[in-house]
Image (tube, rainbow, N blue to C red):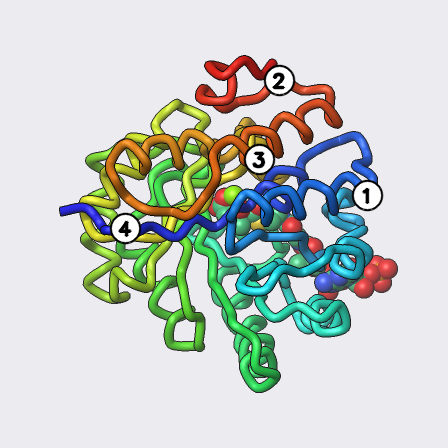
Amino acid sequence: TLPRAVRIVEVGPRDGLQNEAQPVPVAVKVELIERLAAAGLTAIEAGSFVSPKWVPQMASSAEVMAAITRCPGVSYPVLVPNLQGLEQALAAGAADIAVFAAASESFSKKNINCTIAESLDRFAPVIDKALAAGLVVRGYVSCVLGCPYEGDIAAEAVADVARRLLDMGCAEISLGDTIGTGTPGKAQALIETVAARVPVERLAAHFHDTYGQALANIFAVMEKGVAAVDSSVAGLGGCPYAKGASGNVATEDVVYMLNGLGITTGIDLDKLVQAGDFICRELGRTTESKFARAKGCA
Ligand code: HMG
Ligand code: MG
């Protein structure tokens, strides 16, 4: 049975833009975030406090956080890799942060320059301090259905990291199919394995659409009880440390599917399409959303 309601976490302003080579002005990021909130998104990942040498595009996250008009009932989480990032997130007035680990050792090294165990040791004080300050913490696990360097990843390895993040105090664990190699059967098997260690109500699904499997995978994991889905307006994005990774599943397409299933999201699809159209024009890109294209967006 499918969930009655699904919570969408919009990751476009972070996952969508972090890989963008051309500098995106702060004003454009701010307008995108505000348009997404106006469309009814209630969780909008607004940036990340990572090393600007590693991800230059996110260097303006403090400015973005300072400039957005925050809507009541909307959260604006930011990614934080270490205590230095947490300090910046706190200074920026973030109420929600996300730490990010991986189920693949090679990817962990490439993405955050440490082993999985080191990353968890590093996150522990970050999470403690964030919780003490009243923040909500989300934990990501990357490469849950495949790694660009190691290939297949054992579901047990994903479950181990997910459980550790939960025990450390993460409110939600987002399972990232970073390179989009997952297929629905494998995605369901993964959820079964992970849900034996982490309650399914605490899991979110984060699918990149590299192989065109994302919507099918989302439907498959919803059948297993997952009721939180990450997506990116216009299907923007990709991870700079996962070669060939394309954008996240497009939020427009997820909302269209959920509407068709009678699952409520509270999102205004027209306004969402306009938000996607806005950022695509600013970036000089065509949308990756099939729904937006069908509605005449370039
Ligand atoms: P490192 O080089 O090992 O860090 O990088 P370090 O602690 O040795 O510091 C080196 C330098 O970075 C120092 O500066 C620090 O001050 C600075 P220097 O003295 O050389 O001038 N530094 C920082 N600056 C700003 N903010 C900070 C910070 N920390 C250190 N927070 C580090 C380790 C984790 C910092 C680095 O590897 C990094 O920033 N990685 C981020 C990579 C990233 O953002 N990847 C994309 C997000 S993850 C993703 O997309 C996947 C996801 O979508 C889910 C999925 O799809 O699977 C979430
Ligand atoms: Mg991602």
Label 1 and label 4: CA atoms lie apart by 41 Å
Reading the image, the residue beneath label 3 is 238
Q: Which mark is residue 155?
A: 4
Label 3 and label 4: CA atoms lie apart by 22 Å
Reading the image, the residue beneath label 1 is 27
Quadrant including the C terminus: top right
Disc with the residue nearer the chain's start (1 vs 3): 1
Q: Residues within 10 Å of mark 2 (few under 14, many from 20)?
A: some
Q: Is residue 294 left or right of residue 152?
A: right
User: Do the numbered discs 1 and 4 sit on residues whose CB atoms are within 8 Å?
Assistant: no
- From the viewer's perspective, is the residue at label 2 or at label 1 nearer? 1
Q: Secondary structure at mark 4?
A: helix
Q: Is residue 51 among the parts visible in the rendering?
A: no
Q: How many numbered discs?
A: 4
Label 1 and label 3: CA atoms lie apart by 22 Å
- From the viewer's perspective, is the residue at label 3 or at label 4 nearer? 3
Residue type, numbered disc 1:
Ala
Residue type, numbered disc 2:
Thr
Asked if the residue at label 1 sits under 8 Å from ligand 1, the reply is: no
User: Do the numbered discs 1 and 3 sit on residues whose CB atoms are within 8 Å?
Assistant: no
Q: Position of residue 246 (x, y in %)?
A: 53, 28
Reading the image, the residue beneath label 2 is 286
- From the viewer's perspective, is the residue at label 4 or at label 2 nearer? 2
Label 2 and label 3: CA atoms lie apart by 15 Å
Instruction: State the residue in front, 118 or 222.
Output: 222
Asked if the residue at label 3 sits under 8 Å from ligand 2, the reply is: yes
Disc with the residue nearer the chain's start (2 vs 1): 1
Q: Is residue 264 left or right of residue 54?
A: left
